[in-house]
Image (tube, rainbow, N blue to C red):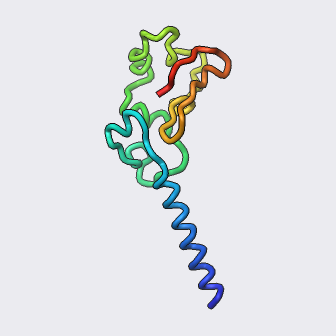
């Protein structure tokens, strides 16, 4: 009986803490303005990992289209020598964004 009660308590706590973590996740910027839901990017499973670039590009267009939209910036942050950089390396929706290029360079862009 005590083992069953302990298992039920553990399961309840796990449920509370896991649902609380997702409830704390908030969007920012345009995604927030558009009132996007978690499953728009994360699918039905809502993983803790960020979506692949292909998910971002479904709405934001091809990499070339993204480069075109930021073409007036000098240098263009989306036209770089390191093609392995992922959208999520700079753009964060649940925490402050970072400019990954500034690890080596000093461009100083404000990353949305």
* Residue for point 52% across, 67% down: 15
Q: On the rendered image, what quadrant is the N terminus found in?
A: bottom right
How many numbered markers are drawn?
A: 0
In the drawing, does residue 87 fall left or right of residue 70?
right
Of residues 27 and 68, the one drawn nearer to the viewer in this rendering: 27
Up-down relation of residue 70 to residue 27 (above or below): above
Up-down relation of residue 13 to residue 110 (above or below): below
* Residue for point 62% across, 15% down: 106
Up-down relation of residue 84 to residue 105 (above or below): below
* Residue for point 51% across, 31% down: 91
Q: Position of residue 69 (x, y in %)?
A: 39, 17
Up-down relation of residue 2 to residue 26 (above or below): below
Extreme residue in the left direction: 34
Q: Position of residue 79 (x, y in %)?
A: 51, 15
Res 40 quadrant in image: top left
Extreme residue in the bottom direction: 1
Of residues 71 and 96, the one drawn nearer to the viewer in this rendering: 96
Q: Position of residue 72 (x, y in %)?
A: 42, 9
């Amino acid at each position: 009986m005590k083992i069953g009660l302990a298992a039920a308590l553990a399961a309840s706590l796990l449920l509370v803490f896991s649902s609380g973590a997702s409830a704390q996740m908030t969007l920012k910027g345009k995604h927030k303005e558009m009132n996007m839901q978690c499953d728009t990017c994360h699918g039905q499973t809502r993983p803790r990992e960020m979506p692949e670039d292909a998910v971002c590009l479904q709405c934001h267009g091809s990499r070339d289209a993204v480069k075109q939209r930021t073409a007036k910036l000098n240098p263009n942050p989306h036209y770089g020598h390191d093609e392995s950089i992922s959208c999520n390396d700079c753009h964060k929706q649940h925490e402050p964004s970072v400019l990954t290029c500034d690890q080596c360079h000093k461009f100083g862009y404000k990353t949305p």
